[in-house]
Image (cartoon, grey):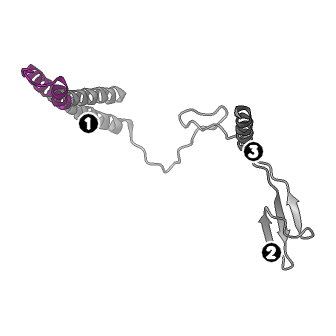
Amino acid sequence: MTTRFSVVTLCAILASAMPAWGQVYRCTDAEGRVTITNVLIDKTSCKRMQVEVDNVAPPPIDSGKRRPGAAAAVTPPDFPSVSADEQNVRNDARRTILNQELADEQRKLEGARNQLIAQEKVPAGMEEAERREARLRPFRETVARHERNIEDLNREIGNLR
């Protein structure tokens, strides 16, 4: 019984893994209308079509890298541009804003750390470890969020030219 089941299962798996085969016909009726179908309507008015299926997908295009031999993108002459001096002014303003946000985020991080320390100092007493962790979790998450924000702001400041 086991061998029979194994053979049947193996046949079913192999049959499902095979590609689909079928015929495609182009049929023209008496009025000249063309129908493409997989069912042979009339042997005299239908011709079998050769259909090749390509199952290989092309590799994805990586927009970050140029292909060898590909031409560089050309900027249209009427495309708006900014002078180098104006771009420097914009970068300086952006750097100032990011530094202000960084200082604000560092103050928030210090406050969050102080709150976490104060909550950790609360005597555990009769509190269960699980309940204590649940009480401290929001404070730890706030500290982690401010640390991530500081990392992101430092990265942004580093990316400025």
**Of discs 1 and 2, which sits in the foreground?**
2
Q: Earlier in the sequence, mark 1 or mark 3?
A: 3
- Above or below, 21 relative to 70: below
Residue ID for mark 2: 33
Q: Secondary structure at mark 3?
A: loop
**Of discs 1 and 3, which sits in the foreground?**
3
Residue 141 magenta: no
Q: Earlier in the sequence, mark 2 or mark 3?
A: 3
x and y, in percent, of residue 88 in the image: 33, 34
Disc 3 packing (10 Å; few <14; some 14–19; many ≥20): few
Residue 59 relative to residue 33: left or right: left
Amino acid type, mark 2: Arg
Distance from Cα at disc 1 to Cα at disc 2: 68 Å
Distance from Cα at disc 2 to Cα at disc 3: 31 Å
Residue ID for mark 1: 93
**Which image quadrant is residue 2 in?**
top right
Amino acid type, mark 3: Pro
Residue 116 tag number: none
Front residue of 154/49: it is: 49
Residue 19 tag number: 3
Q: Secondary structure at mark 2?
A: loop
- Magenta-tinted stretch: 112-139
Q: CB of mark 1 within 8 Å of CB of mark 3?
A: no
